Image: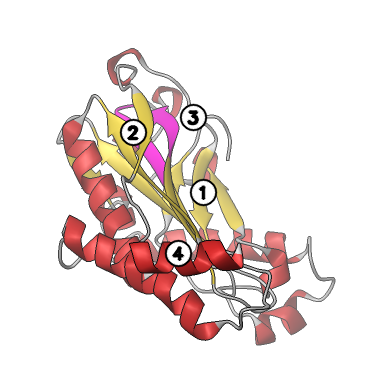
Amino acid sequence: MGAASLSANAGSLISSTEYLDYQLPEKIQKICTERDNCPDIEVKYLKSNHSWIDNTVNARIDNLVVNSKPTESEHIKTKSSRADVTAAIDDFAASQLQDTPEEVSWAYNLMVTPEYLGHVNDFELFEIHSYVFTGGAHGMPYSEYLIFDQQTKKPIQLADMLQPNKKSRFNALAYSAYKEWVKTVDEDVASYEKSWPFTLSDNVTLTDQGIDIRYQHYSIGPYAYGMPVLSIPYSQLQGVIKPQFLPARLSNK
């Protein structure tokens, strides 16, 4: 992602994080300490000077912790309480002791943390990263973007950004970006697409160059290809996204 551009009226956000105050249950702590193999738990929350942003970001973090199996573009349906979060982590930690033999050296890992990406125009940009490891060849990273409108004080989805009746055009631009990305990992685009067909993700963010679309592992490629990002430059998005999402140099044209 290109560095987000700065603007005077959106530059007042001050962002930091704080750790969830969590202790392993005494029984689990005793057993895993004896084994010298305790689960690694790291949950961080956003702490900024914009409480309305914190509330949405941190509710999403709670939701990811409670579910531990995030689904791309799955929005918050219910708000998880702190008791729900603690219970979910307790269960996660306990499952390591139930699932793994004493002689196993690896530990379960659960991480969820927010990152402030900056801002474009009046839009504040965040990304939530999570990682869950419960054994096997590898853990499962996950990442999602969040966009907030400083003017309306509401989260922004891809649908909010598009001009009327322009989703098919945006889909076509994303598909072109997908084919360009495929060329970086495979010589035969047509053959690759049969195994890993294009789908449109609404996990998007703004950058100083355009719109980035983030995909999770296995969405459009095997695990080894990571979490691909498709980029669509603003020069292709005129008439496709609403003017307020374009840089001033283009929105005035």
Q: Residue at x 18, y 68 (%)?
A: 77
Splitting the image into 4 quarters, where does residue 14 fall?
Answer: top left
Callout 2: few (<14), some (14-19), or many (20+) C-alpha neighbours within 10 Å? many
Q: Is residue 177 left or right of residue 60?
A: right
- Give percent across and percent down for residue 187: 85, 71
Q: Inspect the magenta stretch and tell me whether residue 69 lies in it.
A: no
Q: Which mark is residue 124?
A: 2
- Give percent across and percent down for residue 95: 44, 78
SS under mark 2: strand
Camera-nearest label, 4 or 3: 4
Q: Which mark is residue 30?
A: 4
> Which residues are drawn in magenta?
115-127
Nearer-N-terminus badge (3/1): 3
Callout 1: few (<14), some (14-19), or many (20+) C-alpha neighbours within 10 Å? many
Q: Is residue 189 left or right of residue 156?
A: right
Q: Which mark is residue 4?
A: 3
Q: Amino acid at mark 4?
A: Lys
Camera-nearest label, 4 or 2: 4
Visual colour scheme: secondary structure
Nearer-N-terminus badge (4/2): 4
Splitting the image into 4 quarters, where does residue 6 fall?
Answer: top left
Nearer-N-terminus badge (1/2): 2
Callout 4: few (<14), some (14-19), or many (20+) C-alpha neighbours within 10 Å? few
